[in-house]
Image (spheres, coloured by chain):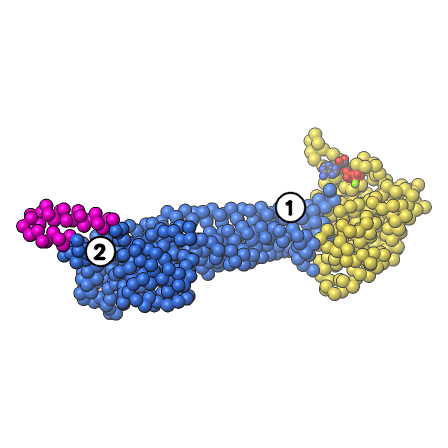
Chain colours: A blue, B yellow
Amino acid sequence: MNLAVKDIRHNFGRFALTTVGVGMLLMIVMGMGGIYRGIIEDATLLVDESDADLWIVQRNTRGPFAEVSRVPANLVHRALAVPGVETAREFVYHTIQREREGKPIRIAVVGLSWPTDKGESLPLIAGRALAQNHFEMIADARLGMPLGEQIRLGKENYTVVGITENMIGSSGDGLAFFTVADALDIQFEVPGEAVRLERQARYARGTLSELGRKQPALAETAFMAPREIPAIGPRQISAVMVNVLPGTTQQSVAAVVAGWSDVSVYTADGQRDLLLRGPVEKVRRQIGLFRVLLTIIAAIIMALILYTLTLDKLHDIALLKLIGAPNRRILGMILQQALLLGIVGYGIAYVAGLRIFPGFPRRVILTNNDLVQLALIVLVISVLSSALGIWKAVRVEPNEALSG
Amino acid sequence: MRNGFAIETKGLTKVYGSGNTEVVAMSNADVTIRRGEVAALLGPSGSGKSTFLTAIGLINPPSAGQIRIGGELVVDGPVALRDARSFRRKFIGFVFQKSNLIPFLSAIENVRIALEINAWPAAAARERAMELLDYLGVADRADHYPATLSGGQQQRVAVARALANQPSIILADEPTAALDGRLGRQVMELFRKLAHEHGTGVVVVTHDHRALDVFDSVYEMEDGVIRRSESGVQ
Ligand SMILES: Nc1ncnc2c1ncn2[C@@H]1O[C@H](COP(=O)(O)OP(=O)(O)O)[C@@H](O)[C@H]1O
Ligand SMILES: [Mg+2]
C-alpha cells in the first residue's frame, strides 16, 4: 500500500490545485528561460543565417546591427579582388515603421544581393524565392502579410512572393527580404517635392561655381537623375559580406581588409559577439537576472508548499509512528509526494508552455539544455524541500497523535 | 513472550517539567497484569491514567522505574532498552478516545497498514483485515473513509487495527467515551473475549462504572498513585 498515493487520491482536489499552481509557476520560469534564449537567437539570427565568414563595415563602427554603417557599393568589387575571397555580397539592413490596415507595422528590411542571392536559402514555409530584381519581397510570417499581398513602400508596390518562419531582427521585428536595389529605394525614398528642391539647389550651386559660370551648359546636368550625374556618388550599402575560399583562413583575408583605412572588418563570431555585448546586452542581462530571481522564488514557494503539506500530516505521521510504522515508510511518503508534485508540475509547465508560448509576440525558445537544467533544479528543490518536511516528521513524537 | 506476566511495572514514576512547573503525574506504580487479564483503570481527570498507559505503551518514557512486557525488561528508567517503535509494532495494540484512524485511508486500509508494516504480504493482509472488520461487525463499511463512519464504527475499526497483529497487550484510553452505553459495553466484552481467547493483557481506562463487571480487575488512580481496588472486582 502506497501511502503517498492514498493520501493524494483522498485529497485529490487539493493536490491537483497545488500541482497546477506549481506547474504554472514553473511554466513562467521555463518561459523566462525561453525568452532569454529567444532574445539571443533573434539577435544573432541574421548573422547566423547570412552565413558570411567576414563582415566589412564602415570604419570604426560596430556594424549594421549595432549602429548605422555606410560603405560604398563598389566595396564588393574591392573585396572580391582580395586573394582567397570566394564571394562578396552586398548587405543592406534597416528598420522601417509603416501603417498596415490602420495598425503600425515594423519591418526589418534586408537587401539580398541580386542575382547571386535570391533568398533560396531562407526557411520558406510558403511561396518562392525572389524571381526578379524589383517589386518582390519575402516576408516573415510574424509580419502577418499573406502571400500575394501588396504593400506600398516609397513610390513602389511590393508583392509578397514568399513567407519565412522565425526570421526576426535583433529588436524582434519580422524581417522582409528585398533585392538590394529595392531595399535601397525604400531606404532612400525621396518625395517628389524634395527631388525638385534638391535639383534647384544643385542648379544654384552649379551656376554659382566657377565651372558653372565658364560652362553654363554643365549646370543643366543638375536636372538629371542622380545616378547619371558623375559628381554624385552611388547610394551606400550597410556592409559587405565575404566568404573565403576553402583552404584559406578568415584571418588572412581579414588581415588584408584591415589594412584599408576606410572600413573595419569582423569575423562572423566577432559580429555575433558585438551584437550580444551591444544592442541586446541590457535586455539580455535584465531577463537573465529576472530568470535567476524567478527560479529562486519558485524554489522558495515549492519548499513552502511541500513543508505545509507535511505539517498538515504531522498528526497522521504521529499516528503512524504510534502503531509502529518505520521511518522508511513515513519519509518515503513525504519524499514521493514531493517528487510527484515536482514531476507532475514540471509536466504541466511543459505542456502548458508548448501551447501558450507560440502566442507570445517574441520568440520563446525552449532548448533541451534549458529544459534539462530546469528539470534538475525542480528535482533538487523537491528533494531539498521535502527534507525540510522530513526533518519535522522525524521529530514528531508518537504521543502527539493523542492530543487534539 | 512465553513466560511471565503480560505487564509488570516496578516503581514507575513520571515527573513532567522541573522546578516551579514540576508535576509528578505518576509515582511508584507497581502493577501486574496477567496474561488474559482485562483490567480497568479508573480515576479522576488529571490523576495520571494516560501517563501510565502511554508509559507502558512505550510512547512516553518514565522518569524512573521498570517495565516488563511478556517477561522481558523493556524499560529501565528513562532509557528504553528496546527499539520502542518496532516493539510497539509487534506486541502492543492501541485504542484511544479519538483521532485514532488515518483519515486518508479507508477502514480496511487502516487495518491493512498495521499488518503491512509488520511485513504481511498485501493479499494476506487484505484477507485478515477483512476478517477482523467482519468480526467487529463493520465489514460493510470496509471501503468507507473514517470521516464517513460513525463514532462507534470508527472505534470498532480502531479495535480491529489494534488486534491485527495479535499483540501481547492492548492499551485502551477511554475507548468508549464516544460510544453510547450499549456499544461501549460491546467493545469491552470484545476485549474480554480476546483476552481470554488469546491470552492478551488488556488495560482499559474508563469512566463507565456500569460496565465494570466485564473486567477481571480494577485499578484506581488518584494524584499519580495507582492501587488495586478490591471492591470493583467481582
Ligand atoms: N506533557 C505534559 N507536560 C506536563 N504535564 C503533563 C503532561 N501530560 C500530562 N501532564 C500532567 O500530568 C498529570 C496527569 O495527566 P494525565 O496522565 O493526562 O491524566 P489523566 O489521563 O488521568 O487525565 C496532569 O496534572 C497533567 O496536567
Ligand atoms: Mg487521559
Q: As displayed, is residue B127 above or below residue A199?
A: below
The image quarter containing residue A332 is bottom right
Of A361 and A155, which appears nearest the observer? A155
| View quadrant of ligand 1 | top right
Task: Look at the image and tell me in which quarter the N terminus of chain A lies.
Answer: bottom right
Would residue A166 appear left or right of B182 to someone viewing this image? left
Q: Which residues are magenta?
A: A193-222
Q: Chain of mark 2?
A: A
Spot occupied by residue A277 in the image (x, y as percentages of width and height): 33, 50
> What number is the disc on residue A311?
1
Spot occupied by residue A172 in the image (x, y as percentages of width and height): 39, 53
Residue type of the residue flagged with mark 1: Leu
Residue lying at 36% horizontally and 49% vertically, measured from the top left: A281
Confirm whether circles 2 and 1 share one chain: yes
Of A133 and B47, which appears nearest the observer? A133
Residue lying at 80% horizontally and 41% vertically, measured from the top left: B49
Residue type of the residue flagged with mark 2: Arg
Would residue A69 appear left or right of B194 to someone viewing this image? left
Earlier along the polypeptide chain: callout 2 or callout 1? 2
Q: As displayed, is residue A11 above or below residue A165?
A: above
> What number is the disc on residue B218?
none
Would residue A401 appear left or right of A207 to someone viewing this image? right
How would you classify the magenta stretch by its main secondary structure? helix
Instruction: Say whether residue A268 is magenta.
Output: no
**Label 2: how many Cα within 10 Å (few below 14, some 14–19, many 20+):** some
| Residue underneath mark 2 | A235
Q: Chain of mark 1?
A: A
Q: CA distance from mark 2 to mark 1?
A: 74 Å
